[in-house]
Image (cartoon, rainbow, N blue to C red):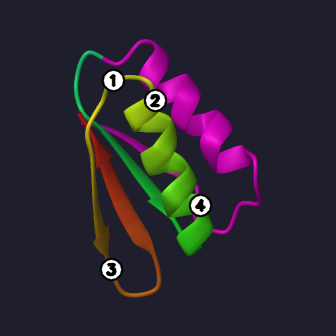
Amino acid sequence: MKEVDARGLSCPEPLMLTADAMKDAKEAVKVLVTEPHQKMNVEKYAKEHGKSAVSTEKEGYFEVVIE
């Protein structure tokens, strides 16, 4: 599973890193973000590109798995 650690980054960086990781991914992509709006943006981006996104709140950050 490819991992994108975007914790602490400002928008639009987490989304740009997610888009880059999804471009050539042949497996699931795990995205780590710190802000709720970043989580929602990543989920929305995944769904707009025909992928499913499952989010989990961890201690101090969110984990979004895109498949």
Q: Which residue is mark 3?
A: 58
* Residue under the point 35% across and 19% down: 25
Q: Which mark is residue 50?
A: 1
Q: Are marks 3 and 4 in contact (CB under 8 Å)?
A: no
Earlier in the chain: of badge 2 and badge 3, it is: 2
Whether residue 31 appears in magenta in the rendering, the answer is: no
Reply above or below: 19 against 56: above
Q: Are marks 1 and 2 in contact (CB under 8 Å)?
A: yes
Q: Are marks 1 and 3 in contact (CB under 8 Å)?
A: no
- The quadrant in which the N terminus is found is top left
Front tag of 2 and 4: 2
Earlier in the chain: of badge 3 and badge 4, it is: 4
Q: Which residue is mark 4?
A: 38
Residue 66 located left or right of residue 47? left
Viewer can see residue 29: yes
Viewer can see residue 34: no
Tell me the kind of residue under disc 3: Lys
Residue 14 located left or right of residue 28? right
Tell me the kind of residue under disc 4: Gln
Q: Which type of secondary structure does the marked residue at label 3 adopt?
A: loop
Tell me how far mark 1 sits from mark 2, CA to CA.
6 Å
* Residue under the point 43% across and 49% down: 43
Earlier in the chain: of badge 1 and badge 3, it is: 1
Tell me how far mark 3 sits from mark 4, CA to CA.
14 Å
Q: Nearer the viewer, residue 14 or 1?
A: 14
Reply above or below: 33 against 15: below
Whether residue 24 appears in magenta in the rendering, the answer is: yes
Write the start and end of the magenta stretch as one range: 1-25
* Residue under the point 51% across and 37% down: 45
Label 2 packing within 10 angstroms: few (<14), some (14-19), many (20+): few
